[in-house]
Structures are given as C-alpha cells and as structure tokens.
Image: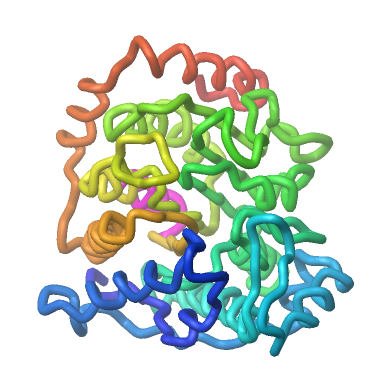
Amino acid sequence: MDSMTGIVRDRRYLDHDPGSYHPESPRRLEAIYTILDGEDMRDRFVSVESRFATRDEIAMNHSAWYVDLVAGTAGKRHASLDVDTQTSPRSYETALLAAGGFLNAVERVAAGELRNAFALVRPPGHHAEADGAAGFCIFNNIAIGARLALKKLRMERVLIVDWDLHHGNGTQHSFYTEPRVLYFSTHQYPFYPGTGRIAEIGSRDGLGYTINVPLPRGPGDGEYVRIYRQILEPVAHAYRPDLVLLSAGFDIYRKDPLGGMNLSVPGFASLTRILMNIADACCDGRFVITLEGGYNIDGQAQGVKAVLKEMRNDTMVSEDFLARLDNESDRRSIDPIIQKVIEQIKPLWQVF
C-alpha cells in the first residue's frame, strides 16, 4: 500500500486572495504545486477530487448565521471577517472547496481506498470558531472532517494533532466537552491567539481529551520528537483512535518569518513518522492531513515534500533516528514542560 497516498489539489484554491501583502498568500500553494510537478514527485500520488462542502456539512461545526455572513461576502471585492481575515470575491466558494476537499480525503481514507492523504488546500481552518473567523481561517476544515467521521462514517474516536506554530483555538473549542475527539497541540506561547495553556484539558465529558503543550521560542527537531514520544504516543495508544487527523502548520520551520521555532525539513518527516506509527498501531494507518499555516514559502514547500515522501514510504525515518533526536534534545529546557503537562493529565490517563 506504499503507493496509496492521496493529495487534494485544485487551482481554485488560489482564488482566495486576502491582499497582496497578506502572509496567507496564494503563492504558498503555488510553490507546493510546483514541487508536486517535479520529476521526483509527479504521478506518484493518487489524486483526490475537491468538491464544495454542503451547507449541512459546514453546519456540523458552524452556526447558520456565521455561514450566512461568509456567504454574503461572495462577489464582493473586499470584506473583513476579523482583523486578520479578509475575503475576496471568490473566498466563500474557495472556503467551501477547502472543507469539501478535506472531507473527500477523509472519506476515501476511511473507505480504505487510500492509506493516507494530504489536503493541500486554503484558506486554512484551525482558528475558525463556530461563529466567527480568526487568524486567516474561515471554516474549520479539520473540525468539520472530524464531525463527518463521527456522524457519517460512524467512527467512535478521532485523534486530532496540531503542530502549527499557533494554537488551534477553534478546533479546541469545537471538542472541549467531547470525549470522542482527542485534541493534542504543540504551539508557541504566549503568542496568538492566546489560548492553549497547560491547564486547558477539556471539561465535563471531555475532561482530559484536550492536551496542550505550550512552548517558548526555540524548540527544534529533537525537542518536538521528545514531546511527541513522551506525551502523545502513550496517550494515543491508550485512546486507540479510529482515525488520525493532523493540522499541519509549517510555520514552525526555523526560517518562518512569523515564528520562533527551529524545525528543519527532516524534522517534519520525523514527526510525520511518529504519527504514522500511531495510525499503523491503532487504525490500520488511517491518517489525513490538512494544510494550515506556513509563511516561508520555500521552506513550507520543502516541508510538505518531506511529509509526502514519508507518507508514501519513499523515505522512512527509523526508530534509531527518532531515538537519536530524542536523546539529543535539550532536556533541561523541554523536560520541565513535559512534566507539567503530564502532571495535569496523569490522573486522567493512567499511562505515565
């Protein structure tokens, strides 16, 4: 099944244009699509068609009045949904297309037609709340995908991992009281949007099913690998998800203009392998990614390429390599954070 990696790709994702100086530029996807046409990438992936998400599908995670608000921007030259999130004439249909493309990827992986898939879509989604846009995001693609998995595909447990530089406030709030979704986030803190403290671990039936690892500036490959192995792996193996979803933000790349992290291109492959290992152990490899942030255009494109090669098993990060990164991590800086997170969730997860 090494060749059964799908990609969602559509030139219409370039039609959302928040402005010539906006960081969330169509050039982000143009660079990725150019990489996909390279000799070592061309024709190596299964094409997953994009489609417009239906209103009912969007409504699984967003209020009717907010959907109406976004729909009202269609055809308008410019509108602001929030201070960071601007629209252009085709932004509404592009946002529907982003959610729908991700839903198609989830459905095909769930059906066993693909082992895994990467939805290379925009606008991104993880900041979008049920009733509002935020942080360049219009509809919360990954939350809508998780809702579909629970409702239509009858899955019982979904793991959402978010390695974007910024905390996925919208995704967290979507499932804060929901035990059928385990949300795990590593993010720079304090930083936009200001959510994602260690103490935010869910509430009511969802208590313990939100895990936040807020980080200062500086962590790189080794520190991230250590976090994912020390915290996420044991919890995920206990949770046994039916599907693993990833909000992949490439703004943790070491040269990202908005970020302060130090991930290398091989670092993205390493984290991908950890998540693939979890998916292989728990849910027959079912793993679907959606694109979030990333504003060093070349670094993001190279990061996406590394992730896709790992997903196809063209490269295979070894256990020895992961162990070496873990051992080389700056434990003095990262272990106190890891221990604080474990202290918060240890009463709820008997795996530490």
Q: Residue furthest right?
A: 65
Q: Which of the pair 121/176 is nearer the observer?
A: 121
Magenta region: 273-284
- What colour-coding does the image apply? rainbow
**Secondary structure mostly taken by the magenta-highlighted segment of the chain:** helix
Q: Residue furthest front?
A: 21
Asked if the magenta segment contains residue 289, the reply would be no
Which residue is found at the position 62% from the left and 79% from the top? Answer: 88
Which residue is found at the position 46% from the left and 12% from the top? Answer: 336
Which residue is found at the position 43% from the left and 61% from the top? Answer: 287
Q: Is residue 253 above or below residue 245?
A: above
Residue 113 visible somewhere in the drawing: yes
Q: Position of residue 212 (x, y in %)?
A: 58, 32
Q: Is residue 327 above or below residue 254?
A: above
Q: Position of residue 68 (x, y in %)?
A: 84, 78
Q: Which of the pair 187/328 is nearer the observer?
A: 187
Q: Position of residue 221 (x, y in %)?
A: 28, 35
Q: Is residue 245 above or below residue 221?
A: below
